[in-house]
Amino acid sequence: MNMMRYQNLMVGDGLSDHRLYPFACNELSSMIDLGYSRLPKEVKVFIFRDCLSAFRLLPDMNTSAAISAANLLLKSVESAFPKQKKNVALVQFKQAKVALKRRTKSHDEDIITPSLPQDILVHIFGLLDVSSLISSSQVSRSWNLAAHEGSLWRSLFDLHFSYEVSNHIHPGFDWREAFKNECIVYNSSKMLRSGRGYCSYCDTVVWHVNFRCPENEWHFESDKVPLDPMFTHQVVNYLLGISSASDESDLAESDSVESDSVESDSDDDAVPGLWAHPKKHTERIPTL
C-alpha cells in the first residue's frame, strides 16, 4: 500500500519540472525526516533513487530556490541514510554542484537579460501561473514592475475566486494584495508553498496547476473546492497512511522541529519572497 501511494505521488515528475523541483525536494526531505524509518524497504529504494535524480537534475534547474531545496535534501540524506547510500548521494551532489558552478559561470558570461518593453513583459507574464509570476518578479527591477501590473492579478483573481467585486473597485485598487488576502482566507497559500493538493474527483494527491488538478479543469472556488490544499507534512501522512488524530499526534512529536524549519524556511525558499513587497492600497473583498 505504501508503495502504491508513493508511486501515485509522482515525485519524479515534480523533480523534472522547473517550477515543482524545489517542492519535490522539500517533499523528499520531509519523507526522510518524518517517515523514513517507518517505510518498507521497497519504498526506501525509490526514495533513494529519487534523491539521486534530484541531485543529478540540479544543474538544469539553476535557481536559488532549487539550490536551497537540494541542500536541505542533502542534510536529510546525511542524517537518515545508511553509510553506503549516503556516500553515493554525496558524490552525486558534489558532481552536480561542480556542473552547476561551470554552467552558472558560462551563463553569466554569455547571457544578457533582455530589456523588453513593459507591455510585452506584461503580455508574457499573463501566460504564467502564480508561482512563476512571483519568481519572475525577482529577476530585475523592470520585471518586478511588470509583474505588479494590476491586470495580471485581476485575471488570476477571476480565475481562482468567484466573487463579484465590481462594486468594491476604486482607483488604485491593489489586485495583487486582494489575491494574497483571498489565498490566506481560503488556505490556498498552502498550495503555493507545497505545490500539492488533494483532488476529491481523482481521489488522490496531485501536483496542482494554478490551483487545479492537471487531470481535470477544476477551478479553486469558494463554493466548491474539489482540490484541497496540503502542506508537505500532510503528504508524508498520506504516504504513511496516517488518518486518525491519534496516529497524527504520534508523528507530530517528531514533526515539531520540521514544521518550524521545513515548512517555514524551506517552503519560503521554494517560492522566495512570496508576498515580500511593500503593501499598497489593500482592501479585503467582502463575501457576498
Image (spheres, helix red, strand yellow):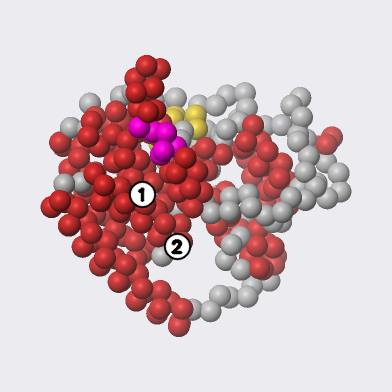
Residue for point 39% across, 22% down: 249
- The answer to whether residue 255 is magenta is yes
243 above or below 140? above
Q: Report which residue position mark 2 lands on.
A: 63
Residue for point 41% across, 65% down: 62
In the rendered image, which quarter is residue 238 located in? top left
- Categorize mark 1 by other alpha carbons within 10 Å: few (<14), some (14-19), many (20+): many
The location of residue 40, given as percent across then percent down, is: 18, 32
Residue for point 62% across, 23% down: 223
Amino acid type indicated by mark 1: Cys
Identify the element where label 2 is drawn: loop
Q: Nearer the viewer, residue 37 or 287?
A: 37
Residue for point 64% across, 52% down: 276
Is residue 268 toward the left or the right of residue 223 in the image? left
Mark 2 vs 1, N-terminal side: 1
Q: Which residues are magenta?
A: 254-259
Q: Report which residue position mark 1 lands on.
A: 25
Distance, label 2 to label 1, CA atoms, is 13 Å
- Quick check: can you spot residue 258? yes
